[in-house]
Image (spheres, rainbow, N blue to C red):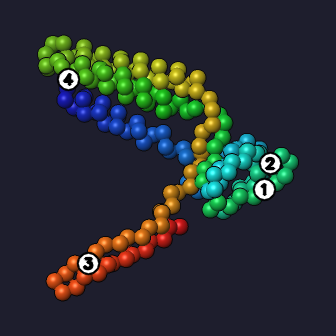
Amino acid sequence: MRHFICAVAAAALSVASAEAQDVAGTFDQLRVLVKPGDTVSITDSAGLRVRGRLTDISPTSLGVDVSGKRREFLQLDIDRIARKGDDSLANGALIGLAIGAGLGAAVLGTVDDGPGAGWVAFASVLYGGIGAGIGVGVDALVRGERVIFAAPRRSASAVDISPILGHRRKGLAVSLRLGR
């Protein structure tokens, strides 16, 4: 029974990483998620947002038709790209499964290995299935913009100043770190 609890806990912990898998970090990855003709919302590094139809994509830039005029955006200038669409049903199913199975496992942890432990394990699996169904139902109702491209986070510039206090010397150490 303890192995079953460990398996449920491992499944619940893996749910958090499942959602982030369909956000591209490069334009090569983005090609899998969109095609010319799709409507996208682009937010540049200055925070300005533009909405238009995708015309073409290269490894370093993309073309968008904005109100009848073609605009080209470089990958380095884009913070994120979003697209309207249905939410993935998979993440709702996984989250519902983890919550339902977690509730069943909580009940399982209160019962000693005895004649009723098998029924509690069955209930945990049953609750997991019910939770997955509820998660799919909730996700089917969710429609909105989903981020499909996010630029890699750039490191911030910083100046570090620290004192130098020695037996015979005193001073300051200054280091400068420039972000991208």
Please tell me in which quadrant of the rendered image residue 111 appears: top left
Tag shown at residue 66: 2
Task: Give the percent coordinates (x, y) of residue 57.
Answer: 71, 55
SS state under label 2: strand
Q: Is residue 164 left or right of residue 18?
A: left
Image vertical order of residue 79 relative to residue 16, above or below = below
Q: Are marks 1 and 2 in contact (CB under 8 Å)?
A: yes
Please tell me in which quadrant of the rendered image residue 83 appears: top right
Q: What residue does disc 3 label?
A: 164
Image vertical order of residue 169 relative to residue 75, above or below = below
Q: Are marks 2 and 4 in contact (CB under 8 Å)?
A: no
For marks 1 and 4, give the CA distance.
59 Å
Q: Are marks 3 and 1 in contact (CB under 8 Å)?
A: no
Q: What residue does disc 1 label?
A: 71
Mark 3 / mark 1, whichever is N-terminal: 1
Q: Nearer the viewer, mark 3 or mark 1?
A: 3
Kind of residue sitting beneath label 3: Ile
Kind of residue sitting beneath label 2: Val
Q: What residue does disc 4 label?
A: 109
Mark 1 / mark 4, whichever is N-terminal: 1
SS state under label 3: strand
SS state under label 4: helix
Mark 3 / mark 2, whichever is N-terminal: 2
